Image (cartoon, rainbow, N blue to C red):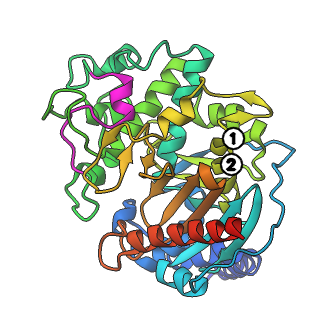
Amino acid sequence: MKRWFVSLIILIVLACGAFWALADKDMRRLVLNLPTDTNVLFWSTEQRDAVFRAMDRLPFLSKSRVIPAGDDPYPLPEGAPLELDTDVDAFMESQRAAALVIVQDGEIRLERYGLDFGPEGRWTSFSVAKSLTSTLVGAALKDGYIKSIEDKVSNYIPDLRGSAYDNVTIRQLLTMTSGVKWNEDYSDPQSDVALFNAHEPDPGVDATVSYMRQLEAEAPPGTKWVYKTGETNLIGVLVSSATGKHLSDYLSEKVWKPFGMEQDASWILGSTGHEISGCCIQASTRDFARLGLFFLGGGLADGKPVLPENWVEEATSHLVDTTREGYGYGYQWWALDDGAYMARGIFGQGIFIDPERQLVIASNGNWPQASGRQGGGQDEERLTFYRQVQSAIDRERAR
């Protein structure tokens, strides 16, 4: 064997050893559990554990764009421990929770971590991002980039003209009442939600627009609610087209910097370079909690209104009925009958906001199934936990 070849092998081995020694625990976990399939819905639990904390560190699976934070983080002082009539550790284990942060009256009342995750890490949002995308519509409306949410979507995305979206308004996209047929079954490899991100786009057309414009209508616009991740991606394209800005830059400009997020975040990009706006903001759980405080405060950042007057109240209201009993839908927010509202993402991501109790609960995790209604019932268990926290605050106030 040639001496130079032996030397090369030795250098490669040493380099690999050096990488392994210097790599942080998240990177080691990632290397050991690296998925080859780009579709997260069909990864193993171990692969999801590894990748959910590092979605923006996989350039060969997905690219991302940074959402820069500012230099003055919004303070999260520690408050008195919250007295709960439940076993939080057992709840965390059952939820396969990576993080749970409860903020009430502006103070952290409870903060726990699991799955070898911590406050310095960043976890994926999945559909929690939908609520932020709709918020950017409000910002663009206030800034004058969008004239009215009664405008036709095709006014801002000309490539949708002639499709089933031709007469759909921005409001109908926001409330998911376009009437366009869509399958959001996470367990079906042939569903729209499983296929659309891998769609080969028409030349010169955004991948989401290319996929969505081939869909057919099943009901008149405004008459039927169907949950559609693809439509939130359309909203993101619309905001980018209207503002002339990347969503990541616009979110940083309007919220991330002025409100005081502690860490830079990132947003995963689709194949044609737009942020996947129905999904995948990588941020710390504390910063997800700060987002809840931004909405509790009516959408003020650095003391200035980011959104039109009454936008938060309207966006988080029960504007349309859904197929889930007890859940209404606003502008990409889930509304409950007691005035609380939620941003929700598959596999256990969530921000629960209760204005009456000045309460925010941010959580990240990795449920065994994408939807917590499957198998272990984690979704209902989490709602029960929210109610227990509300009851604990009510008991405090009654003393």
Q: Which residues are magenta?
A: 168-183
Q: Is 396 left, or right, of 78 in this rendering?
A: left
Q: Nearer the viewer, residue 27 or 73?
A: 73
Q: Quadrant of the C terminus?
A: bottom right
Q: Measuring 70% from the left and 72% from the top, which residue is drawn there?
A: 111
- The tag on residue 297 is 1
Type of amino acid at the residue the image marks with label 2: Leu
Q: How far apart, in angstroms, are the residues tagged by discs 2 and 1?
A: 6 Å
Q: Quadrant of the N terminus?
A: bottom right
- According to the picture, the residue beneath numbered tag 2 turns out to be 293
- Main SS class of the magenta portion in the image: loop
Which picture quadrant has residue 104?
bottom right
Crowdedness near tag 2: few (<14), some (14–19) or many (≥20) residues, C-alpha within 10 Å: many
Type of amino acid at the residue the image marks with label 1: Gly
Q: Measuring 45% from the left and 15% from the top, which residue is drawn there?
A: 148
Q: Position of residue 248 (x, y in %)?
A: 61, 37
Q: Is residue 362 placed above or below 247 in the rendered structure?
A: below
- The tag on residue 108 is none
| For the residues bearing labels 2 and 1, Cβ distance under 8 angstroms | yes
In the rendered image, is residue 161 in sight?
Answer: yes
Which picture quadrant has residue 360?
bottom right
Residue 176 covered by magenta stretch: yes
Q: Measuring 47% from the left and 83% from the top, which residue is drawn there?
A: 94
